[in-house]
Image (cartoon, rainbow, N blue to C red):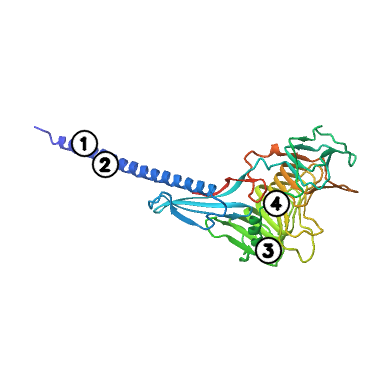
Amino acid sequence: MIRASALYLVIVIALVIGVLCSSLIVVAYFYRSEYHRKFRYDQLQNNLNSGINILLASPDSTYARQVTFSLFGKGADSITIQKSAWGIYNVCKVQSFIQTDTLFKTFLTANLVDSTKWAVMYLADEDRPVSVSGKTAIKGNVFIPKAGIQSAYIDNKAYEGDKRIVIGKKHTSEKKLPALDSSLLNLLDKNFALKGANMANKDFVCWSFLKNTKCFDFKNEERTLEHIKLEGNIIVHSDTTLIIDNTATLNNVLVFAKTIIVKEGFNGKCQLFATDSISVGKNCHFSYPSCLGIIRSKAPRIVSQARISLGENSAFNGLLFTYEKTPNDLKPMISLNKKDTIRGQIYSQDVLALKDQVVIDGSVFTKRFIYRNSFTLYENYLINITFNTNELSPYYLASPITPVASKKKRILQWLEAN
C-alpha cells in the first residue's frame, strides 16, 4: 500500500523536472537569440568594413552624394556611403543596415606620402645658394638650387653642425615649387561665401557628421569665440576679423574668415583658413590633424601681405600653407618665432621667415628663407634651425592638397561610431 505522502513527493519531483525543462528551453531560446544577434552583428560589421574599403579605394570625386546599395545584389547586405571634402581632408560616412539594425562609422581620410616627392626641404632654384650657420641641422633628403648649400659665418655665429651639412640625398630643385591641388583650393575658396545662422549664447555645440553641416555666420561683425566648445561637423564663417580666445575649444571644426587672430595659450584641433592673415599668439598648441591656410584667389582692394605668423614657443601639428592666385609686390609669408615646433608640413608659396631654435619635424616647401636680426635681413640663410624628417611619425598622412600626396588613402582619424 502506497502512503499518501508519496503523492507529495511525486508532485515535488515533477515540479523540479518541469522547472529544469523550462530552464533548458529558456536557455536554448536565449542562446539561439544571442547567436542570431551575434551573427547579424558580424554581418553588419563585415558590410561596414566593405563600405570603408570601397571609399578608401575610390577617387575623391566618387560618392560625393550619398549612395545606398546592396553589396551582393540580393536586397540584403545594404550599405550607405558618402565621401566629401572637410577642409584639406575628406570625411567619409558609412552605414550598414539589415532591417532596423544599423551600424555606422564616420572618419577622416588622407593620403600616403609619395617618397619620391618627399623632402625635408624643397627650396626653389632662384640661382642663389642656401647658407647655414650656428647649430643648424638638416636630416633628410633635400631639393636645393644648383648653386648648392654652404656653411657661413653670420651674426657672430660660425657653422657648428655636421660637416656634411645635409644628412641625406641632395637633388636639384626646379625654378617653381610643385603646385598645390587646384580643385581642392577651389572647393575651399567657395567656403568663404558661406551663409548660415548667427550663433546664439551657447557654451557647447557638438554636431554629428551624419547630419547636414552646421554653419555659424558672423557676417561683417567682428566677434570673439570665448568660453565655448565647438566639436564635429561645424563651420564658423566671418567676412571680417574673427578672434579665437584661449577659453575656446575647437575640435575638428573649420573656420573661414578674412582675418583670424588666435590668442596666447590656445589649445585645440581645427582647420583655420583666411584670405588676409592668421596670427597665432605665444604658447599655443594645435593637435594633429590641424591646418592654417591662406587662400587668396582674388586680389584684395587694398594691397596687403598674405601672412601666417606663430608666436614664440608654439607647437603645431599638421599643415601650414599660403596660396595667392595673383601675385603682388608683397609676397605671401609664413613667419615662425623662437622655439616654435612644427610637426608636419609647411608650404610657403614665397617666403618662410625663421627665428632661432625653430624645429621642423617633417617637410618644408618654399621659394626663399628669411632670417632677420636687429640690423640686417638675410635671404636663404638658416641659423640655429633644425630640419629633421626622421622625427616625423611613420604613420603621418598628407593632405591631398599637397604635392607630395600619393593616390593611396588611409584612415586619418575615427570621428564617430556605434
Instruction: Determine the secondary structure under disc 2.
Output: helix
Q: Is residue 10 above or below residue 243?
A: above
Disc 4 versus disc 2: nearer the observer: 4
- Residue that numbered label 3 is attached to: 238
Upstream in the sequence, badge 4 or badge 3? 4
Q: Residue 169 falls in which quadrant of the image? A: top right
Instruction: Determine the secondary structure under disc 4.
Output: loop
- Residue that numbered label 4 is attached to: 179
- Residue that numbered label 2 is attached to: 22
Distance in Å between CA atoms under marks 4 and 1: 86 Å
How far from the left and from the top, in percent, is residue 3? Answer: 12, 34
Q: Which mark is residue 13?
A: 1
Upstream in the sequence, badge 1 or badge 3? 1
Left or right, 54 with respect to 340, comes to left
Q: Amino acid at mark 1?
A: Ile
Q: Residue at x 54, y 60 (%)?
A: 212
Q: Amino acid at mark 2?
A: Ser
Say whether marks 1 and 2 touch (CB < 8 Å).
no
Instruction: Determine the secondary structure under disc 3.
Output: loop
